[in-house]
Image: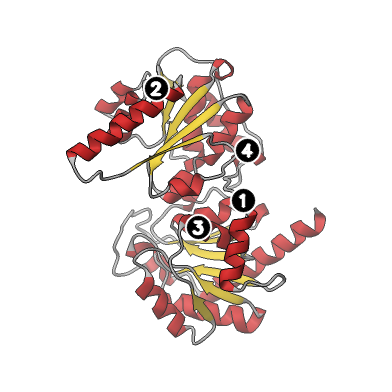
Amino acid sequence: MKADQESFSHLAIASSSGPGVDVRSVQRVVVTRLRFLGDIVLTTPLLAILKKANPALRIAYLLEDTYAPILFHHPHVDEIWPLRRRAGSLRGEVGQILALRRRAQSFRPEVGIDLLGLPRSAFLLYLTGAPVRIGGNYRVRKHLYTHVVRHREPQLSAIDYHLENLSPLGIKGPFAEEDLRTRLDVLPEEVAWIRGRFRIEGGQLMVGLHPGATWPAKRWFPERFAELARQLQSRLGARVVLTTGPGEEELVSRVAAAAQGAAESLPVLDLRGLAALLSLLDAYVANDCGPMHVAAALGTPTIGLFGPGEPNIWFPYRREDGHVALHHPCPLHPCHRDFCEDLTCFRQLEVDEVFKAVTWAIEQRRSVRATD
């Protein structure tokens, strides 16, 4: 999706309840998007725009501890409040709620923004004590917000959707292109550690492939990933690495075996290690999943492979930055299926099309670097 001025014109007419609040008079905000990895990455433009509207603003981010490391060292996050998704017992849940209350009492948020809209996230935001609480028009839980945002139709990109939650603070589009880019940061020592661990030399073309995804219907065929790896090695001389998510070890091993030595499978990395690795790639090919969003946020040219998903919502990345979404919708699209025996949408996506997208993305990055 091209993030131009016209595509954000709807932000000026997003409706909300409650009197508006001038963000310039606010000192502390708590933002929550409890999960998942890609969804959290897609909230980072909202953080940037908040800070731009009020550079003195302090932002706390409440999320599940599984995903918290991805926001470590982020320039627009001042505090991270990790929370376990399942405390293990009622006593454990009460304990972490009390811990959240203590953190909130110390931080004293004036505004809270719920970007998930689940009953739990609405309740947790209420417990922070923020006098201004912004969230969507969601059934009973909307009564836990002081400002209810009624999102516009048709469906927006994920970034657009999040940004509508800023309208009660007087922040409306259009926004600068730079502010609409997702962003993550890695430290030089993290990158150096990954270089050493996997013997990554400077100047070598390296392409990453991610065959996994949360749901089977979102996975392009393993044999096509393997064929893509063989072509990348034989035609471009690329070093091809396969990234692995938790529980995807068998799938990745199958791809590596079918690639016949053209790709090396990497072990499951923690989020900081994964981010450092993705920052070193010349291009990354991934199914519609969290690592796809991490790569794009690090500035790595990313090719997103979409089956039942909707790239207009979940791939709000610019071709000018080397990002490409590949999608062949079937007549049932959008079906939102997690399982599909036919996968017509993916069957239409051939290896040669993906290979051409990778070579274009690599050349696009080189041309941009040449003009910098």
The residue drawn where x is 33% and y is 65% is 216
- Would you place residue 301 above or below residue 88 in this image? below
Residue 33 visible in the displayed image: no
Which of these two is toward me, 58 or 24?
58
- How far apart marks 2 and 4 lie (CA) works out to 31 Å
Q: Earlier in the sequence, mark 3 or mark 1?
A: 3
Q: Earlier in the sequence, mark 3 or mark 4?
A: 4
Residue 200 visible in the displayed image: yes
* Residue annotated with mark 2: 105
Q: Earlier in the sequence, mark 1 or mark 2?
A: 2
Numbered circle sitting on residue 249: none
Question: Which residue of the protein is positioned furthest toward the top in this rendering?
Answer: 19
The residue drawn where x is 41% and y is 74% is 252
Give the SS element for disc 2. Answer: helix
- How far apart marks 3 and 4 lie (CA) works out to 20 Å
Neighbours of disc 4 within 10 Å: few (<14), some (14-19), many (20+): some
Question: Which residue of the protein is positioned furthest toward the right in this rendering?
Answer: 371
Q: Amino acid at mark 1?
A: Arg
Q: Amino acid at mark 3?
A: Met
Q: Amino acid at mark 4?
A: Asp
Q: Amino acid at mark 2?
A: Gln
- How far apart marks 4 and 1 lie (CA) works out to 13 Å
Q: Mark 1 near mark 2, Cβ–Cβ under 8 Å? A: no
The residue drawn where x is 51% and y is 51% is 315
Picture coordinates of residue 61, whole percent (x, y): 45, 35
* Residue annotated with mark 3: 292
